Image (tube, helix red, strand yellow):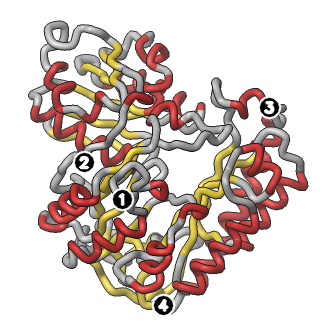
Amino acid sequence: MTTSTQNRVQVVTFGCRLNTYESEAMQRHAEEAGLGEVVIVNTCAVTGEATRQARQSIRRIARERPGARIIVTGCAAQVEPETFAAMPEVSQVVGNHEKMKAETWAGLRDFGVGLTEKVLVNDIMAVKETAVHLIDGMRGRTRAFVQVQNGCDHRCTFCIIPYGRGNSRSVPMGAVVEQVRTLVEHGSREVVLTGVDITSYGKDLPGEPKLGTLVKGLLRHVPELERLRISSIDSVEADDDLLDVIATEPRLMPHLHLSLQAGDDMILKRMKRRHLRKDAIAFCEQVKALRPDMVFGADIIAGFPTETEEMFARSLDIVEECGLTHLHVFPFSPRPGTPAARMPQVARDVVKERARRLREKGEAALLKHLSEEVGARRNVLVETNRLGRTEGFTLVRFAGEVTPGEIVPVTIAGHDGKDLLAA
């Protein structure tokens, strides 16, 4: 969860980088609309726990700021609008499509005069395009996020997100280039391309350009951009241009976060994923051959329905076989309305125990990576006056104060088991 406050508009953000980008755009719309004391809660629905945390946060905000209007939006609000509308602390529930429109926030200005319905959530599946929302920077952040895609056409059996985000739709390449150029002109040194399923980029655009085409075009048309990252990708959709730019362009940072979810073929099939275990391993080997300094992160779910101990062991093993470093572990959480929620469930204590073992495996992989980095020279983008990240997205801790936003060349002197230590 992150919180951003500007004037009297506060935004509390849960979930992904796309939500972070959208929170920045919403905050600006709300300020321009002249809203008074308002707290916008931008929710996540990836797990039941994420929705629970959002409700808990809303109750806390109501206690701490009794005079503020609480407006709830995001994926959880899109899929469960009635849940949040029933909360007495909530003034308005706004859908994922509506939240990005300036006129929505203008209509909220005079509560009870403009938009009078408590729930403003329409059919997200009817949305056919995604427009870029030009912003000149990300307040309080040293890297900027740019939305290039939204929604998802796939229907993984565990996932509720397509019902919160709609079908896949892409931002035209020219608009993305314009947004990145604006961010760079206003001082952003690193930009992260975000979306729900960004490797599906371009299928709905004329000529069907792919993600690699977009990345190459961005780096060519915005030569001043120093560092570019891409967020979570589905490796099975990685195109030849993307692989080429990974191999040849040093401004594309050597870090990829993979949507793996499991290491066992039967579980992958029951998840309705489009890759098998061997595909994931082959992709990582191919990318490492093209870019030896590449660092991989991944999402893995522990305790998916029907998962046996033997199946889980394959998820543990794939951490080493893919050379993963940064692990996001999700204990399986059944989402009502998804096929996985109707499958035979693994006992909750077993799910938690497997998640713990998977996290331990991830911690061991990170420790190995940290040890291998000692003695290396890295260019670190400073995030706070004591912390920054390497090109491979590993945290570096400085002994003295440094200036946020600067890119500092450092020698890695050691590590503390979690972060690298700069000399």
x and y percentages locating residue 334 in the rendered image: 68, 32
The tag on residue 207 is 1
The residue at 50%/74% (across/down) is: 240
Query: Label 3 sits on what residue type?
Result: Met
Label 1 or label 2, whichever lies nearer to me, is: 1
In the image, residue 346 lies at what x, y percent?
A: 83, 37
- Can you identify the residue that label 2 sits on? 132
Q: Is residue 262 above or below residue 89?
A: below
The kind of residue on which mark 1 rests is Gly
Residue at 50% over, 69% down: 239
The residue nearer to you, when weighing 136 against 1, is 136
Q: Nearer the viewer, residue 396 or 379?
A: 379
Q: Position of residue 133 (x, y in %)?
A: 22, 46
Q: Looking at the image, is mark 1 or mark 2 earlier in the sequence?
A: 2
Q: Could you tell which of marks 2 and 4 lies nearer the N-terminus?
A: 2
Above-or-below relation of 84 to 236: above
Q: Secondary structure at mark 3?
A: loop
For the residues bearing labels 2 and 4, Cβ distance under 8 angstroms = no
- Which disc, if any, is residue 376? 4
C-alpha distance separating marks 1 and 4: 43 Å
Rendering quarter of residue 191: bottom left
The residue pinned by badge 3 equals 343
Q: Which quarter of the rendering shows the N terminus? A: top left
Is the Cβ of the residue at disc 4 closer than 8 Å to that at disc 3?
no
- Mark earlier in primary sequence (3, 2): 2
In the rendered structure, the answer to whether residue 411 lies left or right of residue 227 reads: right
In terms of depth relative to the viewer, which is nearer, 220 or 416?
Answer: 220
Q: Is residue 110 above or below residue 249?
A: above
Q: Is residue 67 left or right of residue 312?
A: left
The nearer-to-camera label among 3 and 2 is 2
Q: Earlier in the sequence, mark 1 or mark 4?
A: 1
Nearer the observer, disc 1 or disc 4? 1
